Amino acid sequence: MKKLAFLCLSGIIFLFAPLQASAQDQQMETYKIYDVKAGKVISFEGMIQAMDEADVLFFGEQHDDSLGHAMQDMIYTALLDQYGAVCLSLEMFETDVQYILDEYLQDYITEDKFLKDTRPWKNYKEHYRSMVETAKARGQSVVAANAPRRYVSMVSRKGLAHLEGLPKTARALLPPLPIETGGDAYYDRFQEAMGGADHGMGDNIYFAQCVWDASMAYAIFRYWKKHKQEKIFHLIGRFHTDYQQGTFEQLQQYGKKLRIRNISCFPAEDFADPDWSAYRDLGDFVILHE
């Protein structure tokens, strides 16, 4: 009887496996993944396998892109399944709430208390909660990587020099000073995104952007120094890492031996027949969807 039951169970698994694969295949038809180095479209599994040679993977998102968020969720789960220990790092939480995030992951406090005290983004529950819950369930670390917004706001009003006057307790929440301000290409791209050189906000707004970049890069680097066997998956607005500038460039400065890869994910009007030559400078992998 036991043998018969086993055979029946195996039959059920056999019958349902094609249906599960079909559902996944249908979901992946929503996306196209381009491997810039290989110069070709690759499978989801191929991208995950390519992460074997990476320490840090940036997922450059558009914050209001639901399909992009679904993809990053799939990638995080797949990385965990493939590599075991994967730290989730987030632009969406700031360094001064790291201890509260840790308390929640260790189940000392409730989710309501966690959300009340960490200033989550408005779309947290819709787009990021599932990954934090996956990390919690699987015993993984989550890094609150961004600079406290009060200091970013201060720089946008008064300039970078004012960071030097902060007390040590505040400076401990920031990367080492002075903060690098990136290259000319990043500066020019930022100015263009703000509406051109005549946007009227001065350079301090750019310096505030650099504080974000450096803070996230340093938080990642600091975690990596203590956990070099783990991979780090960082979610970030794609402007910060497209063209391997911004946070990408800052992280490479902190850890010159770090193996970093970046994804740029966004909806594309030419999804049916993409002009990959227009996108290949964005990063290591470009993920498009309609």
Image (spheres, rainbow, N blue to C red):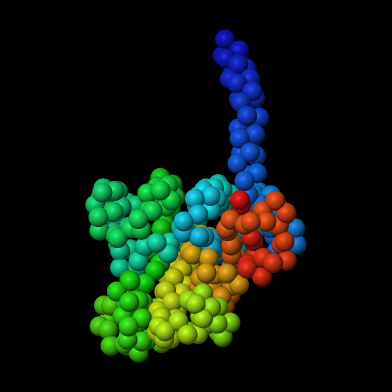
Quadrant housing the N terminus:
top right
Q: Is residue 222 above or below residue 99?
A: below
Q: Is residue 80 visible?
A: no
The one of 209 and 135 positioned closer to us in this rendering? 209
State left or right for residue 47 relative to residue 186.
right
The one of 76 and 11 positioned closer to us in this rendering? 76
**Residue depicted at 56% across the width and 85% down the height:** 184
Q: Position of residue 15 (x, y in %)?
A: 64, 23
Q: How many marks?
A: 0
Q: Position of residue 48 (x, y in %)?
A: 62, 53
Q: Is residue 280 above or below residue 122?
A: below
Q: Residue furthest top?
A: 1
State left or right for residue 117 relative to residue 82.
left
**Residue depicted at 52% across the width and 69% down the height:** 239
State left or right for residue 139 relative to residue 154.
right
| Quarter assignment of residue 151 | bottom left
State left or right for residue 204 relative to residue 253.
left
Q: Position of residue 6 (x, y in %)?
A: 59, 18
**Residue depicted at 61% across the width and 51% down the height:** 290
Q: Is residue 67 visible?
A: yes
Q: Position of residue 286 (x, y in %)?
A: 64, 60
Q: Residue furthest bottom?
A: 161
